[in-house]
Amino acid sequence: MRKLHILLTAIAAATTMMAQETKKSFTLDDLLSGGSTYWQLQPQYMFTTWWGDVAVELTVDKATTIKTPGVKTRTLFTTESLNDIIGHKAVHACTAVTLPYAGQPLVRVQTKQEILLVDFEKKNVAWRMTLPEGAEELTWSPDSRALAFCKGSDVYVITADGQERRITADGNDDIVYGHSVSRQEFGIMKGLFWNADGTKLAFYKKDQSRIPSYPQVDITKRIAATYIDKYPMAGCESEDVSVAIYDIAADKTVWLDNPKPKTDYMTNLSWAPDGNTLYVFELNRDQDLMQLFGYDATTGRKNATPLIEERHPKYVEPMHTLSFLPWDNTKAVMQSQRDNWNHLYLIDLKKTTNGTWRAESGGGEVMDNISTTLLTPGNYEVLELLGFNERDHSAIFKANATHPLRATLHKVKIQKNTQPVLISADDGVHHATISKSGTMVIDTYNSPTVSRRINIINTKNANTTQLLDAPDPWKDYNVPEVTLGTIKAADGTTDLYYRLIKPTDFDPSKKYPTVVYVYGGPHAHNVQASRYWGYRGWEIYMAQQGYVIFVLDNRGSEHRGLAFEQATFRHLGQEEMRDQMCGIEFLRQLPYVDSERIGVHGWSFGGFMTTNLMCTYPDVFRVGVAGGPVIDWKYYEVMYGERYMDTPEQNPEGYAACSLLPKAAQLRGRLQIIFGYNDPTCVPQHTLSFIRAAIDAGTQPDLFLYPGGEHNMFGTDQIHLHQRITRYFDDYLK
């Protein structure tokens, strides 16, 4: 009987191996977005948009209404029909057009030369505007059909009838108008902001004349030339930011009256629906005091008293604009982390109160001088406010309310003292777009067991109509096992989530080399309840090459509350490393992990963490690849660096402890540093300083760079980069 059992076991093992051998192996081109075959192996997708409250499917060839209650399926237009109307091949795919007007048969088409509104029922071009050569930051108002844009460092406007107006005239390398400011921190991603009807334009002015000029090198010239990157390093001079408002009808510009030091931050510009007031969230340079002010759009004068104030001994970080209620222009929804979790608050701009400072559970204090009501109580993060259902007066939002790793859809009634309710599937990570009235959303999500699913959800009753259930595109491939788990943080109480990927064709009797992939910094996370627990393509490839891959989100990362993130304040890298070492202790307990062959890899903050771990724990990490690393926080920029570290003058001990330059002498294993030669984020000074410190200390890191590359690599450079990373681990860890 025992011999029979052994025989059957051997047959089963052989059968499993044969089945695995019949499956395909991945290439890096299959797994990375810069690869030639990447998109062929992504789950089937369906491009959709809203035409008011009508859902529309967009393909390369046509636009078709999606059947919903009261709406039948019909083709609205095709790529061919649009080009016939325009008179030349302006549209290459219907996925590139928009339907900006509910109920009106107008398609917006934008080319490099012009913007057009095509009437697909009358079959004519209803309106067109020629785009000026060299125009950047194009910001178009569908209401007024006016276009704001930048040429160089100045702002221009073209009115709907084609009049071009130059709004600023003194823009140059130091004085920049209409572009994003504060190095795109605080949610700032642009510099031009139309009001609701497109009659007034708010725009930023950035005076960076006091910022030192960091020289970058352009090697594409016959004789290499330098160009200037205005880079404000922590504790040094920073930019002066101002905001102006241009009124089209009056052809007049007014500047907001802001007597504070101009190194203060002005963010989350929010127009009142009537266009008469511009609301601005303002922070001091220390980023520990936030104030919300309203400015008169005609005179530029501000409220004498802040509407809302929040202060925190560590930092306050407003990231979102106000969202006004469609049925009541005097009320808006604000997002705040005042109670430790990012939540929605209803504010009544017309209902003033005699505010006093009061402590909040997030560790700071607030003073509300207008009525403020919490809408989404609970120990979870609101991740996105999608909009409002105008018919039942509710807010629709995305949150991790059901689990820290999920992102599900919810709604809450405004001013009804009701609890939020779940309206989507209670799993996975969801991304949604909302219809004009807010009565429906198109919900696209995936989960560890769902490749991709797209639904239309009725936001009133959560009734769901499935549009797509994509098959697994990897069913013919030998996919490694990906599992989720938790360990305790170094504080002994906090749960940390990890993703573990076992080698393809895993054999529990073997010992495998293991690579820890790390990021670890704020505003990012690696582990989530999406497909294969948020895998990165390179991790799948490395598992296929015979590595165990381990990814842990330490304290300091996002979506776990303010206290979780602020655990690293003023000493970046220290608590994060302690948590990562808890992950190492967990790995050492696994019988298939070779404790003598542990490596680490990360990029940006993860490059900082990789270098730090290699130098701090040289007896643990044998091989590391650090990409675009921060080496010394005094070389990093003001806005991000001072938020988490204060200035070098305020926190000299913290900066000294977090600098990796003295640690270069502790390097023992094989460390390769890779960076973009023209990186404007982690400037080359970081890596070059570390190499100099290593030379002086007699240690031997390896170095590779991408000429012309910036902070991240894209396209074929991305494939080349990961080939190099893989080869380094193969050479020295495998």
Image (cartoon, rainbow, N blue to C red):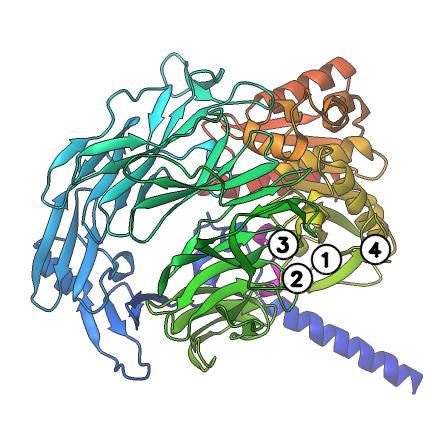
Residue 188, percent from left and from top: 45, 40
Asked whether residue 343 is in view, the answer is: yes
The N terminus lies in quadrant: bottom right
Amino acid beneath label 3: His
Q: Are marks 2 and 1 in contact (CB under 8 Å)?
A: yes
Amino acid beneath label 2: Pro
| Cα distance between the residues tagged 2 and 3 | 7 Å
Q: Secondary structure at mark 2?
A: loop
- Name the front one of labels 4 and 1: 4
Mark 3 Cα shell of 10 Å, populated few (<14), some (14-19), many (≥20): many
Mark 1 Cα shell of 10 Å, populated few (<14), some (14-19), many (≥20): many
Q: Are marks 3 and 4 in contact (CB under 8 Å)?
A: no
Residue for point 25% across, 36% down: 246
Residue 231, percent from left and from top: 50, 23
> Label 2, on which residue?
404
Residue for point 22% across, 30% down: 167
> Which residue of the protein is positioned furthest toward the bottom in this rendering?
1
> Label 1, on which residue?
497
Between 541 and 247, the residue placed more toward the observer is 247
Q: Is residue 145 above or below residue 44?
A: above
Q: Secondary structure at mark 1?
A: strand
> Label 4, on which residue?
493
Q: Are marks 2 and 3 in contact (CB under 8 Å)?
A: yes
| Cα distance between the residues tagged 3 and 4 | 18 Å
Is residue 536 located in the magenta-colored stretch of the structure?
yes
The C terminus lies in quadrant: top right
Amino acid beneath label 4: Thr
Q: Is residue 200 above or below residue 540?
A: above
Q: Which residues are magenta?
A: 531-540
